[in-house]
Amino acid sequence: MNNGYDPNRNHNNYSPYNGGYDPNGGYNNSQTNGYRPYDGGTYQNPNQGYGQNYGFAPNMGYAGTAVQTQARVSLAEYSKMIFLWMGIGLFVTFGAAFALMLYLTSGSISSQIEKLASFAPIYYGGIVVEIVLAIVLGFFVTKMSHTASLIMFFVYSLVSGITLTPILCFYDAGSTVFAFAATAMMFMTFAIYGIVTKRDLTNLGTILIIGLIFLVIYSSVMLLIGHYNSLLIGVLGIIIFIGLTAYDAQKIKKSYAALANDEVMLKKMSVNLALQLYLDFVNLFIYILRLFGKQR
């Protein structure tokens, strides 16, 4: 009887979880090790819960680690990025072209002829560099860093200004300003159309690219045989490049839909699309100038 179980006494010997059974307080887990699930302390702190160091914290995620979310570039930001690069490229091109044009057309006639003769090697070398840079940017932009592709694009814009200079020298300033303003209006109109239209322009783009290849070959042949039809070639060129403007502008939405979760690739593609729209603008300007410009 002395060793029996007395419910009125606190038996420290009976302690299945090292905490003792206390009929007045249940499992005693405040003074001894007692019942301590996952060795994480009591349930009194809901922000720590199971396990002070490793447990599940409702406000902090698993193991107290905050949930990370990937930042996304919006379509509007992506579009602004593309047109910003394109705008800077056009500024570099036309700034360089106008500066060189003023230099080459200043002074006496003999001085101008001498300057143009010395400029010829620079012009032909610029064409070669321009072609190489366009190929690299067109096919390898995704393999380069964003900074490298952007620098290469601006170098291309500068070289393009050099190769554009002889054309500006051939026409008077008034025609050049008119062609630039007309190009800007037409470009904006069809770029906006390409962005907002719900029509898929993929098939149209294929036709336009075939038409562009035909135009280049036809222009080259007619120039060689001496039957260059400036009116026909000018009209075809304008039609092709306003169509390509809408087609390339629609690529902004399509590329964003495909790469929305990859911010790095979006930045790289912004340079590629800026180059395509840049080329549409410059070529549209050249064909408008050739069709409506007044020669010096």
Image: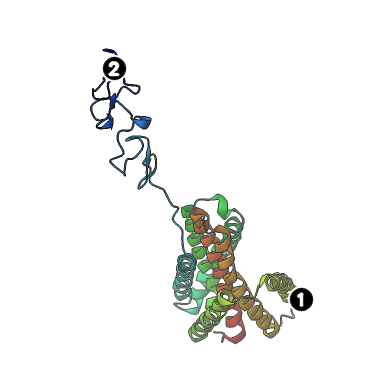
For residue 71, side relative to residue 23 (left or right)? right
Name which quarter of the figure residue 190 lies in.
bottom right
| Position in image of residue 215 (x %, y %) | 71, 74
Q: Residues under labels 1 and 2: Cα distance? A: 115 Å
Question: In front: 94, or 172?
Answer: 94
Residue occupied by mark 1: 225
Color theme of the render:
rainbow
- What amino acid is labelled 1 in the image? Ile
Above or below 212: residue 62: above
Quadrant into which the C terminus falls: bottom right
Q: Which residue is outermost to the top?
A: 2
Residue lying at 38% horizontally and 42% vertically, measured from the top left: 65
Question: In front: 110, or 10?
Answer: 10
Residue occupied by mark 2: 13
Q: Residues within 10 Å of mark 1 (few under 14, many from 20)?
A: few
Q: Which disc number belongs to residue 12? A: none
Above or below 204: residue 296: below
Q: How many marks?
A: 2
* Secondary structure type for disc 1: helix
Residue lying at 53% horizontally and 77% vertically, measured from the top left: 168
Question: In front: 197, or 190?
Answer: 197
* Secondary structure type for disc 2: loop
Q: Which of pointers 1 and 2 lies earlier in the amino acid sequence?
A: 2
Residue lying at 33% horizontally and 29% vertically, measured from the top left: 35
| Position in image of residue 92 (x %, y %) | 45, 68
Question: In front: 39, or 292?
Answer: 39
- What amino acid is labelled 2 in the image? Asn
Above or below 71: residue 16: above
